[in-house]
Every structure is written in structure tokens, then in C-alpha cells.
Image (spheres, rainbow, N blue to C red):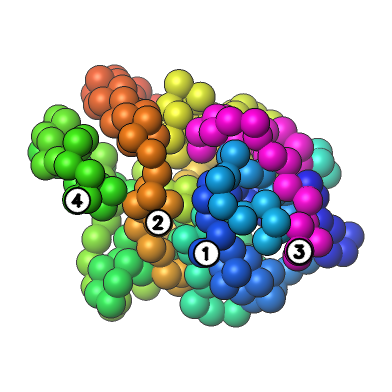
Amino acid sequence: MEKNYCRNKNALIYLTYNSSRHIISNLPSLISSAGQVFSIIAIDNCSQDDSVLLLQNMDIQPLVMDKNIGFTAAINIGLSLVPQSYEWIFIVNPDILPLSDNWMLRLTHGLPDECGIVGARLLCGDLVVHGGGQILQNPVLSIVRVPYEIANKTLWVNEAVGATRVTHRVGHPMHFTKPAIVPWVTFAVVGIRRKMLDDVGLLNEEYWLYSSDVAFCFEAWYHDWEVWYQPVAFSHETGGNMKTAPKEVHERGQHDTRLWLKREDEMIARLQSRINQS
């Protein structure tokens, strides 16, 4: 389950779910370009492909679930296994590729002690950049489009699930080139300070697949921890494994989106109240 590369103070939680086509290129690149030594805690969410075998062939023994328990619960298992003495915990999805050396070192370099969570610069395609999350002044309609449904035509086809003020920042490669404090970051690539985890606790498992990252960042702010964005670049195949996920996985993701939208106003008001008090 855990692969030690040296005495270290960092851990990488690596969650797989039918991820074999990504593991071959993704994981060796993450390891070779990290810039720091670390331990790998690998968890497999009951993959039906060769994900487990590929990890084992890399001398990494994953903790294999007997069913798909979802992103949030699996990540919480990984977080619970990180030794108390570690400093940073990184979560990186298999559909991510680092675009520069020393990504782990660069993500945490120069951050203040108050920073509990740090996210990265994600390039999706040639031009689009997700530079961390934002909270809009006015809500915009959220339309769900999932690649899986282009072929299956059963769920989420142009379905309006509600109006939201929480969304990604999207721009071009010349945008988002400086570190910045942000309300939240996506957990496709994220660093979590171990001290903050002790203070805040684990992710909210009411969210099975989506929105637990946003909710966790809000919890960090409620506990007086800052959330930062660092312009460390990764390529991201958005929704990589969702393209082949079964119908029930999409249904759980849809439920998460609706659950967040029900709670969003209260969560944002609570966050803004907390920030105004500080």
C-alpha cells in the first residue's frame, strides 16, 4: 500500500479507478519530477481493468476496495494512513501530468505558515487554464455535460442543475501566472498541510464524488487556514475516468452537484462572515 522512496515528510495519495491507460505515463512522471522524496499511499476503487497489476509491477501495493466507495471516502482512508510526523500530503489524479520538474517542491515553496491547502495550474487542451476556484457575485446557470453521455444518451444531457456562484477560473496560458490566495481549489492536484488536517478533520463523505474539495477548502477557511494557488503547471484530461464510468457513478456525481447547490448560499455566507471577522 505504501511505497517509501526515502526518509521523508511528504505523502502522495494516489487513487485509481479503471485508470490503467493513465498510470503508465502519469505515475512514473509524477515520481521522477517531484523534486522531493515522499511516500505513496495507493488506493484502488475496485477497478475492473489492469490498474492494480500495473501498480504492483511498479512495486506499489495498493489498498484495494471490494467496491467503488467513491472519491471522498477513498481519499479519507488515504489521509487517515498518513503518519503524524509528515508535513504535506499531496493528492494527484491519474489523469494529470506534470509539465515541469520539481512540482512537489515548487507547489509548497514560499507559502506562509497559515496556508493549509495549495492548488495548481491545470491546462486542459491548448488554451484553457483552470487557475483555482472563485466565488461569483451573481450566480450563473450550471449546465452539466459529461462525455460519457454523448454515447449513452441517458443522463445529464444538457441538464440545467441550478445556478451557482462557485466555479473555476478559466483563461489562457498567459493568465494566472502568480501565486494568489483563492477561496478554493480543485483536488485534481492539491497539497494539504498535515497540521491543518489535524485541525479541520477529514473530507465530508456526504459528497461521494464531487464538491467535497470545495467544501473542504471552505472548512479550512472557517478554521483560519488559508487556501492558495501556485502557478505550477499540469496537464489535465478533464473527467478522464468519467468517460467510461458506469451509469451509477454519474448518478452519484449528479447527486453531489445538487447537494452542493442546496447548501451553497449558506456555505458562502458562513465563509464571508468568517473572513470579515478576521
Find disc 1 in the rendering and name its residue: 22
Are dots 2 and 1 in contact, CB under 8 Å? Answer: yes
Question: In terms of secondary structure, where does tag 2 sit?
Answer: loop
Q: Residue at x 22, y 44 (%)?
A: 152
Find disc 3 in the rendering and name its residue: 57
Q: What residue type is labelled 3?
A: Asn
Looking at the picture, how far across and down is residue 169, in whole percent? 27, 56
Can I make out residue 142 in this image? no
| Separation (CA) of disc 2 from disc 1 | 9 Å
Q: Which of marks 2 and 4 is in front?
A: 4
Q: Residue 240 carries which label?
A: 2
Are dots 4 and 3 in contact, CB under 8 Å? Answer: no
Location of the C terminus by quadrant is top left
Q: In this picture, which residue range is highlighted in magenta?
A: 56-82
Looking at the picture, how far across and down is residue 196, in whole percent? 63, 37
Q: Which of marks 2 and 3 is in front?
A: 3
Looking at the picture, how far across and down is residue 190, in whole percent? 53, 53
60 inside magenta stretch = yes
226 inside magenta stretch = no
| Separation (CA) of disc 4 from disc 1 | 22 Å
Find disc 4 in the rendering and name its residue: 150
| Separation (CA) of disc 2 from disc 3 | 23 Å
In the depicted structure, whether residue 168 falls above or below residue 273: below
Are dots 4 and 1 in contact, CB under 8 Å? Answer: no
